[in-house]
Amino acid sequence: MVDYIGVVDVARLIAAVGPGEFIARLADEILADYRRWGDFEKSARLASHSAVGVIELMPTSDGRLFSFKYVNGHPKNTAAGLLTVTAFGVLADVATGYPLLLSELTVTTALRTAAMSALAARWLARADSRVMALIGNGAQSEFQAIGFQRMLGLRELRLFDLDPAATAKLERNLRALPEFQGVRLTRAASAAEACRGADIVTTVTADKRNAVILTPPMVKPGMHLNAVGGDCPGKTELHADVLRMPDTRVVVEYEPQSRIEGEIQQMEPDYPVTEFAAVVGGAAPLRTGGRDITIFDSVGFALEDYSALRFLYALLDENHIERRKIDLVPALLDPKDLFGGTIGAGAQSRRWRKSA
């Protein structure tokens, strides 16, 4: 029997821990795994693209545990009342190949994306950054806001979305949280207005196209840009000239994947970037001054999902959540008799007697 964590189980875990604390602790797990970057198998995710979206598989292993995530991205889904992104994942034991955990990752991906965003900002943004523009107020936005508030201590959030209802939804959800009672929430009339006075700009839009959310006049010296929404070929948020601005340094998760799917897909093959593992490992310098512009070109990487699945698995015991099991793998008296132990006459009669 394999442990199973569904959406209800994740909601119970979050209720026990608290969303901000969950994100902060998950960020610690992600950081620990990035610091042992060399232990992991790494590859760009396998993507199946269509005219309306993408379905991807994201595998990795550290030689002891293996994980993969199935995830889709279909921006037009919301018009049909469906989520843009859904996901599930598996954590497995390398020694036996047996799956240990099957888990929902739709909610968890939003949490781990926020954890990774805030973690990167801790390393890349100015230490006194307290004002963030949040452009794109859809399904990911609350998680980003909570993560940055918990880990960086925001004083103001400047909100913008092309859909005013999305901004109203975000503001309503955040105002209901105790940790946002002292945070100023400001609705902006445009992306440019949202960026005005911001220390950090987070872009988390959903359109599957080369959009221009940020242009050079909107970016000021000293800013940190958290570019989350550009995450597949032909899908970007930053004008290419933003990446060419003086004193700009770009950090990515895994360079071969980001060259295909990130903001840097717009740039020349030799455009210089730094992997996040080099930053946290001390091999790459951080800001050289207060006027540096840092960009976290985030597309999501399999290591972060590995960290999330490992964290969820540990939380089951820590919070005494009842373990749910599914019969994903047969349990056999004789491992050489798959037929007899599952669909043979003897196995069927045993099941009938048990059900009766």
Image (cartoon, rainbow, N blue to C red):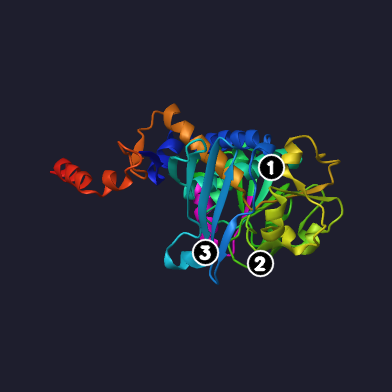
Specify whether 1 is left or right of 131.
Answer: left
Q: Please name whichever residue, 95 or 214, is drawn nearer the observer in this view of the structure.
A: 95
Circle 1: element type: helix
Mark 2–mark 3 Cα distance, whole angstroms, equals 14 Å
Residue identified by numbered label 1? 120
Queried whether the magenta region covers residue 288, the answer comes back as no
User: Sequence-wise, which precedes: disc 1 or disc 2?
Assistant: 1
Q: How many marks?
A: 3
Position in image of residue 212 (x %, y %):
70, 65
Position in image of residue 116 (x %, y %):
63, 43
Q: Which residues are magenta?
A: 158-173
Q: Is residue 85 above or below residue 315?
A: below
Q: Residue, x 52% and y 50% (percent of image)?
A: 69
Q: Is residue 58 above or below residue 100?
A: below
| Quadrant, the N terminus | top left
Mark 3–mark 1 Cα distance, whole angstroms, equals 26 Å
Circle 2: element type: loop
Q: Is residue 183 visible?
A: no
Residue identified by numbered label 3? 74
**Which mark is drawn over residue 234?**
2
Q: Residue extending furthest front?
A: 336
